[in-house]
Amino acid sequence: MSQKNTQTVCIVGLGYVGLPLAIRCSEKGYKTFGFDNNQKKIKSIQANKSPIKEAYIEKNLSRYPISATTNEKVIATSNIIIICVPTPVDKNFYPDLSPVISATKLVAKNVQKGSLVILESTVNPGVSEEIIAPIFQKAGFEIGKDVFIAHCPERINPGDSKWNVTNIPRVVGAFTAAGLEKAVAFYKSIIDGNIRPMKSIREAEAVKIVENSFRDINIAFVNELAKSFDKLEIDVKDVILGAATKPFAFMPHFPSCGVGGHCIPVDPYYLIEKAKRSGFNHKFLRTAREINNSMPIYTVELLKNALNKIGKSLKGTSVGILGVAYKANVDDVRESPAVSIIEEIKKSEAQLNIFDPYIPSQSTVKTLEELLTKSEVLILATDHNEFKNIDPKDFQKHDIKIIIDGKNCLNKEVLEKLDIIYKGIGR
Ligand code: SAJ
């Protein structure tokens, strides 16, 4: 057990970011409250049952207890309050800061003078100055004197067995030197990794947006290559793996049926919209978003073209969808390309069978066997391990005619030898 940290921490928002953070604070000796307005989630945590399928949480929730509650008064008994609520976009891809605003108002209503308030939610540069600070000032706090405000963007990578809340390096920015010092000291007390102080809170906000926009544009690059190389009959995955043999200045990304999740397809819009309000148009970021958003439809087009080649159409065909989650081995469907693929197929009067072992609620069949039995053609939309390990002969046994491999994770050559029409994304 680490040295006793005498301060009390309250995490506001117990999702995939807040819950591991709360557990880590408890592990490091802080008295830790976890506040969430979702009663069901709180009851599950109180019963030591993780509401999220996540290795670190499931392993440590009962080992390092936290006081989970829907009672906002616990904020008043805490010295360090960390806001970890979602920052989604609406259906027009416009940033939705309402969860951050309501959480900040709740904290400003209850927080005691002298406390440190940290925002971990991903926001665009300017949010702390233009939205967070005025809420505390309106509540009568002088920032840097009565309350200290900092930003430390979350970097949780769901499903990652190596990097988690205990060891991912962090960056921290604050309004004042005192606030920065307090926040850096706190993160150094819980994380076995580098904590980098930033020049200001604005640079700290920009870091996360830049990290995830970097990933989005690189995925868009290989998605565009996939469409181009498909016409040149070049296997884009082989090319990327070839380029990746260069030991410097190349970072492999891989094309797929789309970019999902609560980070990559969302965060660039926060910068695009903020910059637009400041008079700059992020053409490149927008184009990357357009390319990535086009991939689900492109994937369905691949299936339509393959069916046409054998004189069939989507109408009346029994289509099996393997996977609904936005990425492998997680149970999260936020912004999942599979959802867009399913919506698109529904327009064509095909018979739809859906199976995701992590998301039974959105599956139309209970087992993989049932899906293969009921389907004539397949789209693999999520590269869960269970799907990657399917014996190719199983597809043949169930007379699957076409497989569209939305994550390029199946063996093209083996499937084609079994007379199955295989189409990947750029291969
Ligand atoms: N994807 C591709 N091609 C790729 C990589 C990903 O199509 O080469 C797709 C995935 O299938 C998924 C989406 O993009 O649909 C996002 O995948 P992701 O691996 O980026 O997973 P996320 O959304 O969980 O991203 C998190 C992010 N972490 C934080 O925001 C704190 C991101 O910064 C990490 O880079 C990423 O994990 C990671 O590296 O795994």
Image (cartoon, rainbow, N blue to C red):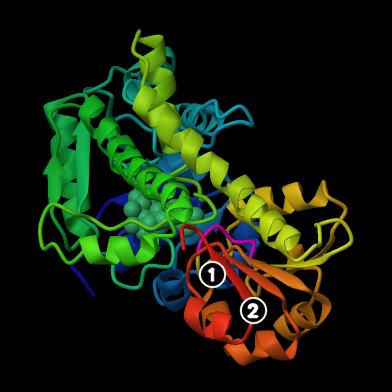
Image side of residue 42 versus residue 143, left or right: right
In the rendered view, would you say 260 is above or below 115?
below
Instruction: Indicate the quadrant of ligand 1 in the picture.
Output: bottom left
Q: Are marks 2 and 1 in contact (CB under 8 Å)?
A: no
Q: Which residue is mark 1?
A: 53
| Residue visible at 46% across and 58% down in the picture | 426
What's the magenta region? 323-327
Image side of residue 115 versus residue 37, left or right: left
> Does residue 418 show up magenta in the picture?
no
Label 1 secondary element? loop
Please identify the quarter of the rendering in which residue 30 is found.
Answer: bottom left
* Spot occupied by residue 187 in the image (x, y as percentages of width and height): 21, 51
Amino acid type assigned to the residue bearing label 2 in the image: Ile
* Spot occupied by residue 148 in the image (x, y as percentages of width and height): 26, 30
Q: Nearer the viewer, residue 399 or 136?
A: 399
Q: Earlier in the sequence, mark 2 or mark 1?
A: 1
* Spot occupied by residue 304 in the image (x, y as percentages of width and height): 71, 55
| Residue visible at 80% across and 57% down in the picture | 314
Q: Which residue is mark 2?
A: 420
Q: State how far apart marks 2 and 1 are (Cα).
A: 35 Å
Q: Nearer the viewer, residue 187 or 239?
A: 239
